[in-house]
Image (spheres, rainbow, N blue to C red):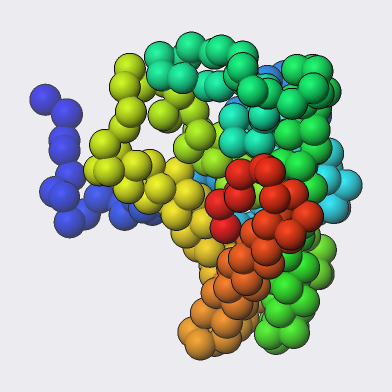
């Protein structure tokens, strides 16, 4: 019978082992879909992917953002911003009788353009302060460049919020009837609040990695999201003044 070491004698297993090597997206030896999947999966492992995100160039992260985030930035706005289509329950779609004279195709393109501009500004409104604060609070104890690491953090995680917003607007369209208040509140929590909390965690662990104190790391992670919230409110005001006939997007 093989010897089984007592539990106390067994080597301790790390709760969150670090990803070795570069981000999956940057590993040219892997198939394209594997690279994409591993990088998306790493979004939900902030500590494990910390070093892989901190080290490297910005260009691969930018290419990943264009592939993973921009499509959702375009898609999320189709349901709330189109004026020629009515998205009913159970994935039914009908043409509105009192729709404007704009062709359906152009109406959808306009909605996607609004979504891209609004969400693009919202994403930059937290990414730019985060990069600046991370560089300011870094104590120089790490060999990586904090500004480069900040942009890589933002670009690799930028898909989360527009993806959640897309699912948020799909929920009432997918359900067989009008969702209850509980379902709406649950969707807001799961699809709008939790993605932002995930970004806050990524920002916090990156700030700690570069030597920011507990309070400093809180500033680095929380202030950018507060700025994003303020920008979202400002975008609502712009929508009311310049696009009075269009629905107001969420903050």
Q: Which residue does the image show at 67% across and 29% down from the upper left?
A: 83
Task: Count every numbered label the image shows and give the total.
Answer: 0
> Please, is residue 131 above or below residue 73 in the view?
below
Q: Position of residue 178 (x, y in %)?
A: 33, 28
Q: Which residue does the image show at 45% across and 43% down from the upper left?
A: 191
The answer to which image quadrant residue 212 occupies is bottom right
Image side of residue 240 versus residue 226, left or right:
right
Residue 43 is at least partly visible in this image:
yes
Which image quarter holds the C terminus? bottom right
Residue 153 is at least partly visible in this image:
no
The answer to which image quadrant residue 159 occupies is top right
> Please, is residue 79 above or below residue 164 in the view?
above
Q: Position of residue 10 (x, y in %)?
A: 25, 50
Q: Position of residue 228 (x, y in %)?
A: 64, 66
Image side of residue 134 versus residue 61, left or right:
left
> Please, is residue 6 above or below residue 166 in the view?
below
Residue sticking out furthest to the front = 98
Q: Which residue does the image show at 67% across and 30% down from the upper left?
A: 82
Which image quarter holds the N terminus? top left
The answer to which image quadrant residue 102 occupies is top right
Q: Position of residue 224 (x, y in %)?
A: 64, 71
């Amino acid at each position: 019978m093989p010897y089984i070491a007592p539990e106390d004698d067994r080597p301790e297993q790390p709760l969150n082992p670090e990803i070795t090597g570069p981000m999956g997206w940057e590993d040219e030896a892997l198939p394209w879909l594997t690279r994409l999947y591993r990088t998306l999966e790493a979004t939900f492992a902030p500590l494990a992917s910390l070093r892989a995100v901190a080290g490297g160039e910005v260009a691969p992260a930018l290419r990943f953002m264009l592939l993973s985030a921009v499509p959702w930035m375009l898609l999320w706005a189709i349901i709330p911003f189109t004026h020629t289509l009515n998205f009913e329950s159970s994935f039914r779609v009908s043409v509105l009788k009192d729709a404007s004279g704009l062709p359906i195709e152009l109406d959808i393109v306009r909605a996607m353009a609004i979504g891209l501009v609004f969400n693009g500004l919202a994403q930059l409104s937290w990414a730019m302060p985060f990069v600046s604060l991370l560089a300011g609070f870094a104590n120089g104890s790490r060999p990586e460049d904090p500004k480069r690491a900040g942009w890589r953090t933002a670009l690799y995680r930028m898909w989360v919020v527009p993806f959640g917003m897309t699912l948020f607007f799909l929920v009432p369209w997918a359900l067989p009837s009008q969702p209850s208040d509980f379902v709406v509140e649950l969707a807001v929590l799961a699809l709008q609040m939790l993605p932002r909390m995930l970004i806050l965690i990524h920002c916090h662990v990156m700030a700690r990695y570069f030597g920011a104190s507990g309070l400093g790391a809180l500033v680095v992670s929380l202030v950018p999201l507060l700025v994003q919230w303020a920008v979202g409110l400002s975008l609502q005001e712009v929508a009311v003044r310049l696009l009075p006939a269009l629905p107001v997007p969420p903050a």
